[in-house]
Image: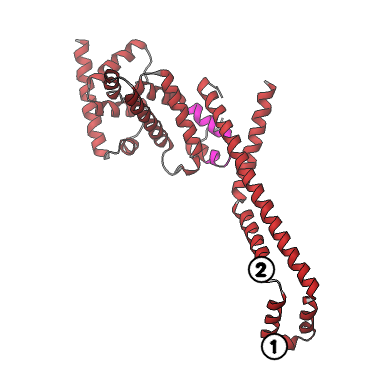
Amino acid sequence: MKRSNITHSVMDKVVRFEEQRTKRWLAVFVITVVVLTGCAALFLFYTYAVVSERHTLDVLAIFYEDREIISEFWQDTLSVAIEELPQKPLVLGSSALVLLTYTWIMTRRRRRIVARRMAQLAKRKKSSDNK
Amino acid sequence: MYKMSDESLVRAVAEGDISAFEQLVGRYQSKLLSFVTYMVRDSQAAQDIVQESFISLYKTIDHVDTSRKFSSYLFSIVRNTAISYLRSRIRHAPLEEAESVASLDVPEALVTGKEEKERIETALDAIDTKYKKVISLYYFEDLSYEEMSRLLRLPVNTIRTHLRRAKDALRTVLTYETQ
């Protein structure tokens, strides 16, 4: 395709704009994913540590030894589980996990587009370097 | 080689294909430059306006309605950018220049041959501004009645009437000049 001056200068500006936009988007995306993953890991690990320390799972295991106990005393089983589990970190960790999954699903299309743009930007950069 | 439609190119750009935008720029730049050059009567400013319009198109390409004709949308962006430029020039220009700038808002005749071009330009200048617009858009930018109707925000029947009157007026002027 013939590239006149205006095409060249427009494409230069478009490439500059796209580089900045892609960098900005990637930075926001990576920070979001890292923060959410960190929060989820931290809070869920803390929950697990507390559960291990309190031997909550052993308490729950007593109920599981006989299924009839659960069907008969399911309210008690539930209240024991709720009381024994550290609620605040569990809720925070689960929320972070849900948000992470939501972010990952919602950015599927955008990630595909950004990857394509990055590949094209790299190709352009390479060809301009070769000139 | 298979030529993609404008709308397909727009969709491709929105999907991350930067080279599709280059094709769009290549396809429309000369038409837009002619259109704007006639509006602002300054080729350097016209280049800046067209460039700015293309950049602004790229930034908002995700929101372009591909079910409607792309060329009309692009011309309306360029027209609005050119009008903004003219307004800013009027604000910053001395009064005499501002008056002359304010009267210019007609696209350039895309004709070959300098003499013929000048003759048609002179004839176009002699007819009413609203008729000049429809003549230029219809004959030089190849827009349909419906596209002009959307661009100029006028009913299709009004466009049809304007075009008929414009042709009559242009014919009269050209005939008069020839005699």
Read off the chain for label 1. A
Q: Residue at the location (63% across, 48% down)?
A: A29
Front in this rendered view, residue A26 or A8: A26
Judged left or right of residue A62, residue A127 is left
For residue B2, which quarter of the picture? top right
Contact flag, marks 1 and 2 (Cβ < 8 Å): no
Q: Are marks 1 and 2 on the same chain?
A: yes
What is the quadrant of the N terminus of chain A in the image?
top right
Q: Comparing marks 1 and 2, which lies closer to the viewer? A: 2
What distance separates the C-alpha of mark 1 from that of mark 2?
25 Å
Question: In the rendering, at what x and y percent does residue B54 appear?
Answer: 47, 31
Q: Which residue is mark 2?
A: A88
Judged left or right of residue B22, residue B66 is left
- Predominant secondary structure, magenta span: helix
Of the residues shown, which amino acid type is indicated by label 2?
Lys
B143 relative to A43, above or below: above
Can residue B46 be seen in the rendering of this structure?
Answer: yes
B177 relative to B14, above or below: above
Question: In the rendering, at what x and y percent does residue B93 appear?
Answer: 33, 21
Of the residues shown, which amino acid type is indicated by label 1?
Phe
Front in this rendered view, residue A12 or B25: A12
Q: Which residue is mark 1?
A: A73
Which span is picked out in magenta?
B11-28
Label 1: which secondary element: loop
